Amino acid sequence: LFNMSSEVADVLTSLVTYRDEVPQGWSPSSYLANLALWDVEPAVVMALRAQGWRYTRWVDDITLSRATPPRLAEQTAAFDLVFGMLRK
């Protein structure tokens, strides 16, 4: 994404992790969540809107809602889209 050297990437990684993790609530968490989803989230949001869902996200908290109760198949399809995005 940023075309940086592996040395720079290593330093940045060490700055935003503790014991090989990003601790919950640390300042970099919101930036890292946005970076992780920047290229896949817009397509997922559009697909969900087409199915009648409203997608909202605050940092790493994702919520799906809609005006009418979904059928199980609709709910499963929406969850599959979101989980697929997170796996990417």
Image (cartoon, grey):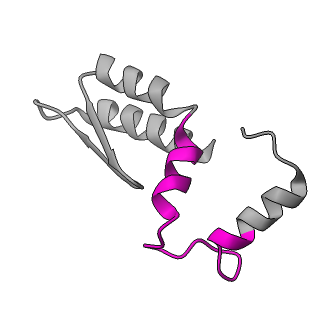
Query: Left or right of 1: which side holds 50?
Result: left
Residue at horizontal 79 percent and vertical 57 percent from the top: 9
- Up/down of 21 relative to 12, above or below: below
Task: Tell me the quadrant of the picture where the N terminus can be found.
Answer: top right
Confirm whether the magenta stretch covers residue 28. Answer: yes
Question: Of residues 78 and 39, which is closer to you in this image?
Answer: 39
Q: Residue at x 73, y 72 (%)?
A: 14
Residue range corresponding to the magenta coloring? 14-38
Residue 81 versus residue 35 in the image, above or below? above
Left/right of residue 16 with respect to residue 5 in the rendered view: left
- The answer to whether 74 is drawn above or below residue 58 in the figure is above
- Residue 71 in percent (x, y) is at 23, 32
- Determine the residue positioned at 48% across, 23% down: 43
In the picture, the quarter occupied by the C terminus is top right
Q: Quadrant of residue 6?
A: bottom right
* Residue 8, position as x, y percentages in the image: 82, 58
> Most extreme residue toward the left, as rendered?
67
Looking at this rendering, what residue extends furthest in the bottom direction?
19
* Foreground of the two, 7 or 83: 7
